[in-house]
Amino acid sequence: MTVEAHKETLGFQAEVQQLLRLVAHSLYSNKEVFLRELISNASDACDKLRFEALTDGALYESDPELKIRVSFDKDARTITVSDNGIGMDRQEVIDNIGTIARSGTRQFMQKLSGDQARDANLIGQFGVGFYSSFVVADKVTLRTRRAGMGPEHGVLWESTGEGEYALETIEKPARGTEVILHLREEESELLNEWQLRSIITKYSDHITLPVLMPVQKFSEDKDAPPTIEEERINQAAALWARPKQDIKEEEYKEFYKHVGHDFEDPLAWTHNRVEGKLEYTSLLFIPARAPFDLWDREQRHGVKLYVQRVFIMDDAEHLMPRYLRFVRGVIDSNDLPLNISREILQGSKIVDSIRGGSVKKVLGLLEDMAANDAEKYGKFWKDFGRVIKEGPAEDHGNREQIAKLLRFASTHNDSAEQTVALADYIGRMKEGQDKIYYISADSFAAAKNSPHLEVFRKKDLEVLLLTDRVDEWLMSHLTEFEGKPFQSVAKGALDLDKIASEEEKQEQKQAEDQFKDLLTRVKEVLGDKVNEVRVSSRLTDSPACLVVDEYALSAHLERLLREAGQNVPASKPHLELNPQHPLVARLKDEVDPGRFGDWTHLLFEQAMLAEGGQLEDPASFVKRLNGLLLTLGH
Ligand code: ADP
Ligand code: MG
């Protein structure tokens, strides 16, 4: 190690600087939360140590009693929060404190408007954790040493929160982390035992480790000087282990902020004790807003596993399926061994059944919310709907229940908002209608204006408009709902016979006879580009559209798969022509044979464009179009 590496000054990542500036502004009215954040971090650090020590007991360094200490020094004007948890090495300090490694950080920063009041609201959902220290302190010193490393490997980090921080190698005999806040002039009232005590009780009572504070004890003898004794400030009883009726709403909320690493209250929670063959308690929360790493495969937080109140591990995958990855909370089992490893978790029947039971609880919670508080559910769906849509594919067993939770945009409403439940749709089905119709497209506008919808509009049949990327995936795993099969309006022959009048059927038959010749000629021109050319019963306004077979990939899915780099064989759609359309009528009777080819290609190409497809040869399309435009007026 070079000398410079022992003592150096480093710049904060640009995002951190921006964040720090915002923090001071946004937390101003709620500054005491800094203590909650520091205690929360200390508690996490102890949890991490306990987990790593499962495989390496030496990490305890003969100091196995994990605890958190809060103290203050009136003369030095400091508050200190320390723990004997895992600690950090130099690189970890740089990565965790000087950088925001979270994915989604950049997108978050782009959302900031520069209007401090507005941005202050946003910062809450991002979470500021450690940086909240700078709201009350004008200088923060962090001293830390990673468990298992020698005392000479301590690291000192210090910053005034203005662009730079200093790093230094120090001696630190005790493992763990100590955060020293040098208070701003105006924060003197924090230098007071009762003040700190009340903040800790308000925000951190649920922390399961003891939070200790040195307090003055006066003896009976009035003349004797007071002694200093360490006292436990928090209850240190696992919140979830207490009877439900004894827990206040506020306590649930504060607990959530710790386990969920969130600054906002949760949207809802479910707290259950299961007894019988298996015994476990679960306390599971739905956040009010999607975390920024919702789409990150490596996202960090999930449901924590405890065994008999002892933290075992933070584990997203084993305790919740991917489609419920936004759920936060704890599961505490009485049946698992304390020294359980990830490998054992993997194949454990106990874990499987705890997971199964917990999933049911979350689905039940959401079902209740949907039934009793549509507004709240709407908020939930906006943020997490796309994740829930992964459910039917991932969790076949709960497919029906998940399907009830789904919400879609539909032709019944004018807005792109997803508010229609499948049960609503079924309630509005027309006499003789036996399918749930849907269309999938790249955008709401493309779906809503698709030629495929024309006949449905005419017959006043509702069609679900699917425009999320995950929708195609969803529909390939959802074949029916309450006995009604799903049918893409862009696929197969539309079997609208039951809804069609005798007259309409007659017309269709007639058109098929009249256009027979034309269909053959069009097919000759287009050759291999299309499968079959037929008379459409789908269209009212547009001259033509493309349709794929019932079991073929939809054009939209084909595009998605190609974008994802998959080698999808080009499928051949059917071209359908609208016999009522004047262009088609002219093609049949009037177009001079020299232009027939251009007209035909244009019909095919516009059908392709209308459904969001890409032309194989756009230049030829433009040339043809211009050629025809030039004949106008002649
Ligand atoms: P979060 O807790 O949500 O990760 P914070 O800003 O509160 O965000 O903390 C950032 C990171 O700094 C933590 O994830 C952790 O890696 C590290 N850290 C903070 N405090 C401590 C501590 N007392 N002991 C060890 N690591 C800590
Ligand atoms: Mg934190």
Image (cartoon, helix red, strand yellow):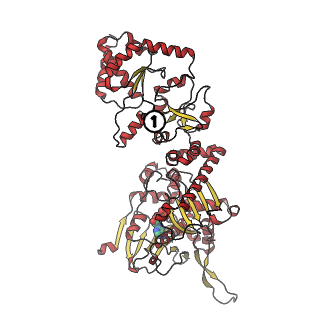
Q: Nearer the viewer, residue 369 or 162?
A: 369
Q: Which residue is mark 1?
A: 443
Please count the marks in the image.
Answer: 1
Q: Nearer the viewer, residue 495 or 112?
A: 495
Horizontal side of 268 relative to 489 (left or right) equals right
Percent x, y for residue 304?
53, 62
Q: Is residue 383 visible?
A: no
Query: What residue lies at 60% left-to-right and 48% top-to-bottom?
Result: 366
Question: What is the three-letter code of the residue carrying label 1?
Answer: Ser
Query: What residue lies at 29% left-to-right and 74% top-to-bottom?
Result: 2
- Figure quadrant of residue 226: bottom right
Horizontal side of 324 relative to 240 (left or right) equals left
Q: Nearer the viewer, residue 258 or 503?
A: 503
Location of residue 208 with respect to 25 vertically, above or below: below
Q: Nearer the viewer, residue 321 or 153?
A: 321
Query: What residue lies at 40% left-to-right and 67% top-to-bottom?
Result: 92
Percent x, y for residue 440?
47, 34
Query: What residue lies at 46% left-to-right and 14% top-to-bottom?
Result: 511
For label 1, count other residues whose C-alpha is less than 10 Å away and answer few (under 14), some (14-19) or many (20+): some
Element under label 1? loop
Q: Is residue 81 visible?
A: yes
Horizontal side of 233 relative to 612 (left or right) equals right
Percent x, y for residue 22?
48, 57
- Figure quadrant of residue 236: bottom right
Quarter the C terminus occupies = top left
Percent x, y for residue 215?
61, 79
Quarter the N terminus occupies = bottom left
